[in-house]
Each structure stands twice: as structure tokens, then as C-alpha cells.
Image (cartoon, rainbow, N blue to C red):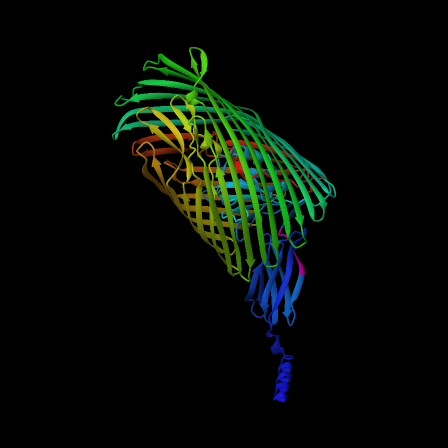
Amino acid sequence: MNKRKHHTIMLFLFFCTLPVCYIVAQSITGTIISENKDPLSYVNVVLLSTKDSIMVKGTSSLDNGSFSIENITAGSYILKTSFIGFSPYYKSLTIKDSDIHLGHIVLKENVESLDEVVLRQPQLERKVDRLVFNIQNTSLSQGNLMDVLRNTPGVMVINNNITVRNNPVTVYINDRRVYLNSSELTQLLNGTSAFTIKSVEVITHPPAKYDAEGGAIINIVMTKNVAIGYKGSITGNYTQGVYPKYQTGINQYYKTNKLNLYGSYNYTDDKTDRLNDETINFMENGAQTGLWKTHTDRDTWSEKHVVNAIIDYDINKNNTLSITANAILMPYWKRNTTANTNAFVIPSNSQIDSSFTSLNNTRDDLNNMGINAIYEHKFNDKGEKLSINAHTTYYDYNRFQDVHTKYYDAQQNEINSNTFQSDAFQKVNIYTAQADYILPTETTAFETGIKYGNIGSDSNLNTFVNQNGVYEKNAALSDLFLYNEDNYAAYVSYSKNWTNWSLKAGLRGEYTETNPFSTATNTSYKNKYFKLFPTLHIQHTINENNDLGFAFSKRISRPNYSSLNPFRFYLNDNSYVEGNPMLQPTITHKIAMDYTLKQTYTFEVSYQHYSNYITELGFQENDTNILKYVSVNTKASDMYSLDVMVYKNLKNWWTLSWYSSFFYSKEQFYALENNNEITTNDKLSAYIQAANYFTISNTVSADATLLYISPIADGSSQISSRTYVNLGLKKSLWNNRASVSFRINDLLNTANFTSKNNYANQNNSNKARFETQTFQLGFSYKFGNFRLTTNEKDIQNKERERLERNQ
């Protein structure tokens, strides 16, 4: 028995010396980097059969550039990498009885050398949870951040409002949230040079590490500083619309072995024009009883100063401390609004029965200052790290209004007048602290973090009415509104790559307590709630030319502070804006599936459901002839979309970006002037965006963009179609040390629109004419060792976005 067993063992060992024993599976590992030694993530790595070039196995690289292909049988193979913007890499391999570690694989960029300037076309890269628009060393890097966003696939900039795939966006820079209101964000983006931008990440389903607040995310990735020295730049532009506008700025950067310093200052002198023609048909029992036609001319002047200062100090190779300070100062903001209203009594044969004219002079002052302190500890060179961030914001805002209204009879004789003034103050203090930990391996990554935020806001409105030449305070039109909010958050996230699968899943929990109080109503509206926000992203590579994806996310949008304030802000005697302290946060569920062909053509179907959608709706009071704008929660909103995206280098000098979205939106809201009857507003609509980028010569680049928006449903309104045609031309000078640019926005002047409300007893329309057609001439000059890259970044905290004010 023992002898037989001995012979069996010997026979097994003998056969294991033959080639058949090589069926034992082995693995291939390595790390993919660029020529600048930066790790490259999501590079496609495939193993091809030497015999027939059929793909045997494949994977993609992780955030640290590493990859692993496992369970490979013995044989001869060809390893191939593919990555947009880089040349393919090939290597012949023979798998025997041991694992193979390839070390660093260096990919070379596909660039076109143009004298001393190295320019290439922008490239689009698809990751499991985002799209990455790489613009480093492209013609777009010679403009500013707003220029880059206007040209990013899927991103639409309309009247300086930024949206992604029909959703409002939150902007991050280097994964740090920029929480400014829309006008301040526009100033920041227009005043930041794109020379230091590496890429723009468009995240339509944000993973758990990002705040649950908001919709889609745009993360702007800045280039890393690599060399010691000093550099700087000055920029300026002149824009002519109805009125001229000026902007200038200076950026300076200095680096030593351990210390990085960055400072910037931007100044804007702006005057804009906006016209509105409004028609209100007053109704009673289905019959028209009156007609108002109003023409409004609004001119706005502003001066704004934006200052940023950044200090990065490398304590040692594993520990870094950063201090960021920024300030937006607006000492002068003035608006003159003249509204002429003609009233008709039906039937009147279009004869004016009476009229009134309102002149609203508004003056704003604003100080918005924030400081961040960030400590980062790297445990090793494999990416394991801990970061701690503390933030504070001080926001001080004042708005003064002086409103004069005169009333006339049919013969234009003045019969009455009214004058009032209002003085509104708002002070906000924000404190946040957060910690994030990440533990990556070759095929997985684990992330977790916690955050606490506190917001305190005091809003004070005093209204004074002119009584026989003396201004007396009107208590009924005055209020003190106090708001306090505490938010506690924690999240976990896990990602893993298999041969041809990628998974990223996370869960974020947030507990919120709010306590608004109004002295006008002597009422406190306390609210406490805990919400969980799951996210899931799955991507499957069928083969080299076909990819499938699935995503699910849940998000929240909290009301901004001004929309919670219950007092009435009068625009004139017959029109006011009113907040709502009872507003509930909006909860959004989104699910999507996509298919990508040859890494170029992407098709996505998605569904979004909004609960308690927050919006501002306009209502006409037919019995009092008052028009009011009220912040409300709608009953429900739904959107079904089919999106098509194409990004293709047609020639080495021509790149086409195509994005189209065909969507059906349905919104159900409560008609306040019709016994809160549930009313439905829906529409089948489309967005079409086509952008072309051209490299004309070694120093000249151009772009041409078409954006068409079909009629859409928005809140209670139906909005007419719009078309934007934008052209841009850039010329580099003096060995890329300077550049000049010329841009025409809304070439055909077809970007204005009309909104209409027509349901139940509401019948009104508004034709808005913004200053969309502009001509801009820009200049930039780089001094010092301008080929250095910078530590420029902007770090804000999420609560700052809600510092909106009425525009």
C-alpha cells in the first residue's frame, strides 16, 4: 500500500515536470505613468493572443496607475495599452511558471510640436464615475476657466449659469468645493487663467465622498508644481455689449524646496443691460377683466475685487500643511430699474385706462471672506493617506433700495405717488471641519470620512415709507430673520477593478438640524432629519470597442437662506418677492445606463425623480392686481432623457464635440391662486451642442460653437427656443509668453427668450432680452519662469453656495 502510494507521488511529480503542468495560472502587474512620471488611471490594458490577436483578458489601471491581470495560462501574448491622447504601448510576453511584474510603463503623449509651443487637441476620457476633459497643452489652456467650461462636452453656460445634462452644478477645484453664488462664481472663473488647468471632470452621479448637496459636479484639476522658481502673469480683457466692460488681473507664484506661495488679484468694472416686456391678462371666471403691459429697463453697474492667497508647506515627504485665504469684495454695485406699466380695462379697444411708472434705485455692498487650513499625511508611497480640513467663512451683505412710483390717468395726468425705502442686511458665519482617509491597493480602494458644519445667519430688513416728506418705519414690512443649521455627515466608499469590470459603491449619511426664526411672525420653524445617500457605479468592458455602464445616485438640495426668509421684498408697489421658512429640502433619485462605442460615441438613457423640488414661481393676484414671486416646494418633478455624446479628432487640426439631449420633463406644482390645485406642466424638449476646435497654425487656434435649446417646461412656465452661436480666435506671441484673443458670443443675437404662464386663472408672459451678444478682446502676458506649473487652487466649503441673493 505504501509502495503504491510512493509510485503515485513519483508519477505526479514526473508529469509536473512536463509542459502540461504550466496550466497553473499566473499574473501580470505593473504601473502606467506619463513621461512626466504622473500616474495614469483608467488606461485600458489588454492581453492579445500572439496567434490571432484576439483579446484574452483585459483590465484598466487604478488611480495610482497600477494594474493587474490575473489567472493567465501559459503561452505567448502581446500586452497592449490604449489611452486617449497617448500612443499605444506594445510588449511581447511569454507566460511560464511565474508571475511577471513589468514595473513602470511609460506612455508617450500624442502631440504636435509647433516650434517651441507644444499644442494638441483636447481629449475626452471616460472613467467609471466621470468624464475627464484633458486640456493641458491645448489651445484652450490659453484662455480662462469660463472659456474652458464653455467648451467642455456636456457643459452648458447660459447667461453665466452653468448646467450639466439639464442639471444645476456644483464646482470643485482640486476636489475642494467652491461655494459661491452664481455671480461670484462667474467672477472667479473669468479671472482664473486656464494655463494651470490639467483637466475638467464632469461627474453626473457624484460618489459618496462628495457632499450630498447639489446636482452634478464639475471638478477642475490643476497641474502640480514640479520645479523651483518664480513666475507670474497679467491678464486683461475688454468686452463690448450694450455697454463696455473691463477686467484685469495679476497672478504670482513662487516655489522653494518646501514652500509654495501663490497670490492673485482680479478687478472687474462692469455695466450690463437687461430689458423685459411683460404682459398680464387679469382673469375672473374665465373672462379677461384687465390687461397690464409693462416695459422694464434695468441697468446694473458693479465693481468687484477678488483676492486669493495660498501657502503650501511640505513639512517632510509625508506631511503637508496648506493655508488658503480668499476674499470677494464688492464695494460698489448699483442698479437702476425703470418700469413703465400701461393698464387697459377690457373691453377698451386697446385704449390706455391708466398707467404708472416705478423707478427702483438699488445699491449693494458685499464682503465674502474664507480661510481653509488643510493637513495631509501620506502613510506610504502606495496612496494611503489622511487629510484634515478646517474652514471658516464670514459673509456680510447689505442692500439699499429707493423706490419711487407715480400714477397717471388716461390723459397722462399725475394723480398719485408713493415712495418707500428698504435697508436689508445679512451676516453669515460658517464653520466646518472634515477628515478623509483613503486606502488603495492594486485592484481596490477604500475611502471613508466624517464632516461637521455649522451655519449661523442673521437677516434684517427695515422698510421706511414716505409720509408727507418724512420716512417712517413700517413694522409690517420689516423683519428680523435668524437661521441656524448643524450638519453631521459620514461616508464609506469602495471600488474594485476586475479583468473587464469596474465597481464603485458608497453610502453617505447626513443628519441636519435647522432652526429658523422670524420676528415678524414670532414663529420658530425647527426641522430635524436624517438621510442616507447611496451611490453605485458599474462599468463593463465587453471588448476593446464596446463598454457598458450603470449608475444610481441619491442627492439633496437644501434651500438657500434668502428663500427661507418669510418677509416680502418689494420690487415696486405692485410686485414683490416672498420667501418661505417652511421649505423642505429637495431629494433627487437618478438612474442611468450608457453604452460607449470605440471610446468615441456614448449613448445614455436616464430617469430622474425630484421630491419637494424647490423653485420660485410667479403668481398674479387677479383681485388685487399684484404680481408675486414665491419660493415653494412642488409636488413632484420627473425627467426622462436620452443623451448622445460624440468626441472625435476628425483631423490632427480639427476636433468635434457633439452633445445632444432629448428629454421629457413633467412638473406638478400647487397653484396658489387657484385653491392650491395640482397643476401639471410638461414638455418634450432637446438640447443640441456642437463645438469645433481648430489648430490653424503653430500659433493660431480657433473654436466655433452652436447651442440650440428647444422650447422647454420650467416650473409653471413654458419657455421659447434659443440659439447661441459663439466664435473664438487666439494667437500666441513671443514664444508663447503672451497671447491675444477675440471672441464673439451670440453672433446672431438669437439667445433671448419668452416665458409664458397659461393655466386656470393665470395668463401672463415675459419677454427677456439679456445682453448676450458681446464682442471681447483679451490679452495675457506671462513673466518669470512661466513654464513652471503652479499650486493654484481654490478651496471653499459647501454651505457657501447657499449665500444667494436676489439678482
Question: How many dots with numbers?
Answer: 0
Residue 585: percent from the left, percent from the top? 44, 40
Q: In this rendering, does residue 239 appear at all? A: yes
Residue 131 visible: no
- Give above or below for 338 relative to 531: above
Residue in the image at 59% along x and 41% along y: 433
Classify residue 558 as left or right of residue 105.
left
| Percent coordinates x, y for residue 168 in the rendering | 48, 40
Is residue 521 rendered magenta in the image? no
Tell me the quarter of the image containing the N terminus.
Answer: bottom right
Q: Is residue 269 above or below residue 615?
A: above
Quadrant for residue 616, please give it. top left
Decide whether the magenta segment is chiefly helix, strand or loop.
strand
Closer-to-camera residue (181/710): 181
Query: Would you say residue 106 sits in the magenta stretch?
Result: yes
Q: Residue furthest right?
A: 257
Q: Residue furthest top?
A: 468
Q: Residue at x 46, y 42 (%)?
A: 529
**In the image: residue 358, left or right of residue 398:** left
Residue 629, image x, y percentages: 40, 30
Q: Nearer the viewer, residue 471 or 259?
A: 471
Q: Identify the magenta region.
A: 103-110
Percent position (x, y) of residue 690?
48, 44
Say which of 584 and 711 sits in front.
584
Q: Nearer the viewer, residue 467 or 523?
A: 523
- Residue 298 vs 745, above or below: the answer is above
